[in-house]
Image (tube, grey):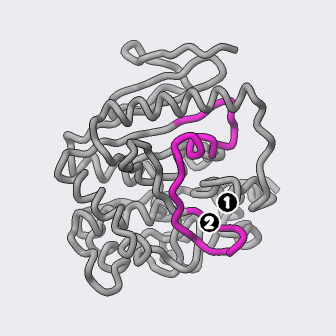
Amino acid sequence: MLSRLAAAALAAICLGASGAAWAGIPAFCERGKEVTAAEQDRVLRFAGAVKRELEASQQSVALISRAGLDLSRFDLLYSHAGVALKDEDSAWTVRQLYYACDESRPRLFDQGVPGFALGADAPGQGHVSLVFLDPDDAGRLEQAARNKPLALALLAGRYSANAYAFGTRYQNCNQWVAEILASAWGAIGSREKPREHAQAWLREQGYEAGPVRLRSRWLMFAGQFVPLVHVDDHPVDDIYAMALRVSVPASIEDFVHRRSPQARRVELCHDTRHIVVHRGWEALGPGCTPGLDDEIIPLDS
């Protein structure tokens, strides 16, 4: 039973982009528990802090990631990435891939920052990571992300939460973000088979997806009974090694940081006591514990 629950947790990568796309364990595509007024107020204040950092950047695009369900058994915190874009009315939305349960397929979805923050499974705590690129890289990413024909051309027809990062049979949300980055920075948006070209460029540039390490072979078998988890696209050697090369937010951020050391990262978290704003590439401490130089915004209990 534990292995099946772990497989279900793996399936939660990229899910939860909206109420219609929320997934829990083990009842996929059912709405989560109701959020209390106090929890909603706390998350909205957290979203306000995120928007403040987006505004303070004086940019109109950023990479954004959030923690969803608990993926600590895979040594992961962040599960879902997207591209934050500022529109003509100075409002920020997150362009992202999500799994549309009613259509049983992946879709692109634009969502406000509060809704993105509310996608966390536990409203009592949450984490969001923002990466601000240098002007040249930011401009190329914004142009590609706003190019709807290109964005849709990079969208696969089949979804797998643990999709192989260098395969086109399936796709997960983070894989789409990595491929839109490749299309922007590799100038490959106008070519046929853009996903293949994007993945080839990522390989050439040294992009390292995951690996998501599985602690038990039973987890691999349990995945056969959990929706939205597949292994038939992964190389056999990776399956035997129990190390699946899956695009996750940490992989994307590591790649961006290596490519652009001058890129800036801001990590925000909240619990029931406070919001913590941490600037820099070093990870926050366990839970939502502030460091000496971190900004602390108190929350009413």
Check residue 99 in the rendering and tell me which mark sits there, or answer none. 2
Question: Where residue 123 sits: x, y (%)?
Answer: 68, 35
Q: Residues within 10 Å of mark 2 (few under 14, many from 20)?
A: many
Q: Which amino acid, by three-letter code, is at mark 1?
A: Ala
Range drawn in magenta: 98-127
Q: Residue at x 58, y 79 (%)?
A: 232
Q: Residue at x 62, y 74 (%)?
A: 105
In terms of image quadrants, where is residue 266?
A: top left
Q: CA distance from mark 2 to mark 1?
A: 6 Å
Question: Where residue 277 sits: x, y (%)?
Answer: 44, 24
Question: Where residue 67 sits: x, y (%)?
Answer: 56, 43
Q: Is residue 240 visible?
A: no
Q: Nearer the viewer, residue 181 or 89?
A: 89
The reply to whether the C-beta atoms of the residues labelled 2 and 1 are less than 8 Å apart is yes
Check residue 21 in the rendering and tell me which mark sits there, or answer none. 1
**Mark 1 falls on what kind of element?**
helix
Q: Nearer the viewer, residue 63 or 286?
A: 63
